[in-house]
Image: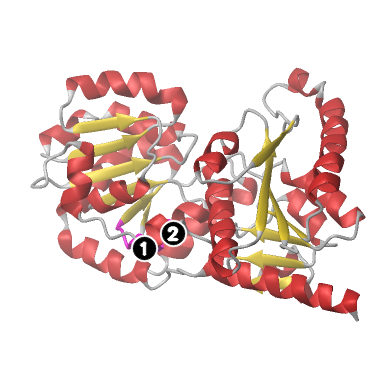
């Protein structure tokens, strides 16, 4: 019988792309494996997972809305409904294992699997664990983490340090700088800055760029600006005025963007940093100030302490970000130092390590049941 695995979670690219990387690794190790994704209806996984070639089931579930308490009235009903949906999905698919990658859709799936005695695996990408992952970690079969010191969140005997899975298109990227420039219609002779706020965009980065956008043209520097949907329209207007700027809400093929960029402006979520380490790009990091326990600042400072990145606080971005990025784009010696140091932190096979461990544990459990 083919092994069957459910991968649950999503909400942002930081959860979805590692999940797809794990799925691809499982398929590579054991091509006959059946993989089913479970996500939240209306979220980006419902689009990105099928694009990657995998089936997905959507749950009627939503996260807690901190900005508008009135919007949380229907939450208990959605949670109850999602548990009924999960029960049907798990009963119909009959998985040998369930993997949770974070995001609120992972919680009911893993909770139900644990109640049924199905092996569960968690991937926690951040240096500060999410609350649902901490709750699920107590009964998880294995918890995969990016770095040491995570025993303050999870049982030590369940931890396995793997690093964070990076998309294979980025790990195995052979695209040249010239091909990257051609993809964006930019001039290969000019220095180029890539600004990305993650799949949903970053308000602090967008406003800082918008406020001093003219400085890029004045310094003969090009900008690839990934805005997220909320800022896309406003940024597009700025791009019409400035021919040295490429703007879009989302970059489908990030490997071209990394190939084209001399310098990257980015948030400092765990997955963004994992990719920057792999592509060895000089980076100006702007931590999201409202991340749990300010873990994005911790992530950024970890790189800064190793002379592997520059950090600009979100609260100082309007004054400092553009000048810092332009200064770095003009300083090739500083770029070389940052490239060398960030490259030392790269992990390129986390997806394979995770995939092999899942299959090994499942095989051991099957053997025990047979015995």
Q: From the viewer's perspective, is residue 17 above or below residue 65?
A: below
Q: Which residue in the structure is indicated by mark 1?
A: 172
Kindly identify which residue carries mark 2.
168
User: Which quadrant, please, contains the N terminus?
Assistant: bottom right
Q: Main secondary structure of the magenta part?
A: helix
Is residue 216 shown left or right of residue 13? left
* Residue 263: x %, y % from top left: 26, 51
Q: Position of residue 371 (x, y in %)?
A: 91, 81
Q: Nearer the viewer, residue 263 or 184?
A: 184
Q: Are marks 1 and 2 in contact (CB under 8 Å)?
A: yes
Q: Is residue 364 magenta?
A: no
Dividing the picture into quarters, in which one does residue 303 lie?
A: bottom left
Give x and y (percent) for residue 90: 82, 47
- Horizontally, is 202 left or right of 209 in the view? right
Work out whether residue 316 or residue 35 is closer to the camera in this orientation and state it: 35
Picture quadrant where residue 278 is located:
bottom left
Label 1: few (<14), some or many (≥20) within 10 Å?
A: few
Residue name at image x 39 percent, y 62 percent: 171
Of residues 263 and 101, the one nearer the viewer is: 101
Identify the magenta region.
Answer: 274-282
| Residue drawn at the location 62% of the way across and 72% of the way down | 356
Q: Tell me what residue is drawn at x 15 percent, y 52 percent.
A: 330
């Amino acid at each position: 019988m083919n092994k069957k695995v459910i991968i649950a979670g999503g909400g942002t690219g930081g959860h979805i792309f590692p999940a797809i990387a794990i799925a691809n690794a499982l398929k590579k190790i054991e091509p006959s494996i059946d993989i089913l994704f479970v996500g939240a209806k209306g979220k980006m996984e419902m689009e990105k997972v099928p694009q990657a070639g995998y089936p997905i089931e959507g749950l009627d579930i939503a996260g807690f809305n901190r900005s508008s308490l009135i919007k949380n009235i229907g939450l208990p009903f959605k949670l109850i409904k999602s548990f009924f949906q999960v029960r049907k999905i798990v009963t119909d698919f009959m998985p040998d294992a369930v993997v949770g990658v974070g995001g609120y859709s992972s919680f009911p799936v893993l909770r139900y699997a644990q109640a049924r005695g199905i092996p569960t695996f968690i991937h926690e990408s951040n240096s500060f664990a999410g609350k649902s992952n901490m709750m699920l970690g107590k009964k998880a079969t294995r918890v995969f983490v990016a770095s040491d010191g995570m025993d303050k969140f999870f049982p030590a005997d369940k931890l396995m340090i793997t690093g964070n899975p990076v998309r294979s298109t980025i790990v195995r990227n052979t695209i040249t700088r010239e091909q990257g420039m051609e993809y964006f219609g930019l001039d290969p002779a000019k220095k180029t800055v890539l600004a990305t706020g993650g799949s949903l965009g970053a308000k602090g980065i967008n406003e800082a760029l918008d406020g001093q956008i003219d400085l890029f043209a004045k310094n003969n520097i090009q900008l690839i600006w990934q805005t997220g949907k909320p800022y896309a329209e406003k940024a597009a207007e700025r791009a019409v005025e400035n021919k040295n700027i490429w703007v879009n809400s989302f970059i489908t093929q990030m490997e071209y963007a990394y190939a084209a960029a001399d310098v990257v402006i980015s948030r400092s979520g765990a997955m963004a940093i994992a990719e920057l380490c792999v592509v060895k790009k000089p980076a100006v990091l702007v931590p999201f100030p409202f991340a749990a326990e300010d873990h994005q600042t911790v992530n950024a400072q970890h790189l800064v302490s190793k002379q592997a990145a520059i950090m600009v606080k979100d609260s100082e971005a309007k004054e400092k970000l553009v000048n810092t990025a332009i200064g770095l784009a003009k300083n090739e010696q500083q770029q070389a130092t940052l490239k060398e140091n960030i490259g030392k932190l790269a992990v390129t096979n986390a997806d394979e390590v995770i995939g092999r461990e899942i299959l090994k544990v499942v095989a051991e459990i099957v053997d025990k049941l047979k015995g």
